[in-house]
Amino acid sequence: MDPEFWHERWTRGEIAFHQPDVNAHAQAFTDRLGVGPGARIFVPLCGKSLDLLWLSQQGFRVTGVEISPQAVSDFFAENNLQPRIIEIPGGQRFRAPGLDILCADFFQIDLADLPVFDAVYDRASLIALPAKQRPGYAERMERWVRPGVRILLLTLNYAQHEMPGPPFSVSLAEVEALYGKTFRVKELHREDCLEREPRFRKKGLTRLTEHVLLLERKP
């Protein structure tokens, strides 16, 4: 999406995509990333997700990337954290113990501005992007992820014509097409979640399936 789209959404408070609690799948499946306390977990397009704080509380060192200054400032204010702010090319780094958020455009950020990370948690990044941007997103992830590193990826699958995104529908077949040459893709869990997501039913969806996927970079 155009960066201005996200700036306007956050400025107007149109953030129905923000979850007020820690994601249940993060709690259930983070251990499948195969890393322990002290490992660096990368969270792209992170918003002000409480998952960041939860991961940090598990002992992980967390690095997020988020384009909206409003989202970043809200995260630290709402969690009573006082970050140290450092200027970086194209944005700012907000740093607190065990937790960094780079306020910058994911598609413009330099790999040199990221630490070497041991795992990736993607709850709402890939599904936030329209189809034309998803290949470029996957290509950047392929360049950044070392062999053996795993990605915990959550996607939604529905009839795209029934609702404009975001969040967009991303099928298991599309994930295979985007990542299959470089990553092993394994489905850990799927569920029909339309009943617990009435806002999507109101928008006209007749089905909504959530997939929890584990991707591991091939040697």
Image: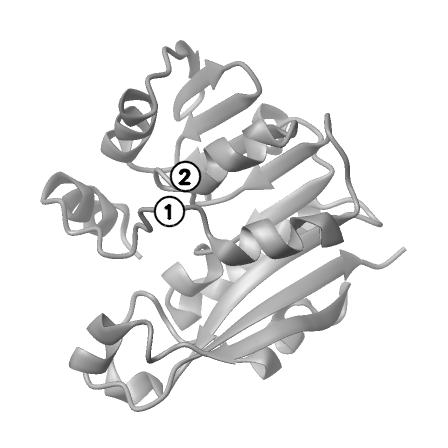
Q: What residue is shown at x 37% (from left), y 67% (from top)?
A: 130
Q: What residue is shown at x 38% (from left), y 60% (from top)?
A: 128
Residue 183, horizontal then vertical, whole percent: 76, 63
Quarter containing the C terminus: bottom right
Circle 1 residues within 10 Å: few <14, some 14–19, many ≥20: few
Residue 59, horizontal then vertical, whole percent: 65, 27
Q: Residue furthest left?
A: 12
Q: Residue furthest right?
A: 219
Q: Is residue 91 above or below residue 86?
A: below
When asked about the image quadrant of residue 179, the answer is bottom right
Reading the image, the residue beneath label 2 is 50
Residue 63, horizontal then vertical, whole percent: 55, 31
**What's the amino acid at mark 1?**
Asp
**What's the amino acid at mark 2?**
Leu
Q: Can the viewer see residue 203?
A: no
Reading the image, the residue beneath label 1 is 21
**Does the CB distance between marks 2 and 1 fall below 8 Å?**
yes
Quarter containing the N terminus: bottom left
Residue 93, horizontal then vertical, whole percent: 44, 19
Q: Secondary structure at mark 1?
A: loop
C-alpha distance separating marks 2 and 1: 6 Å
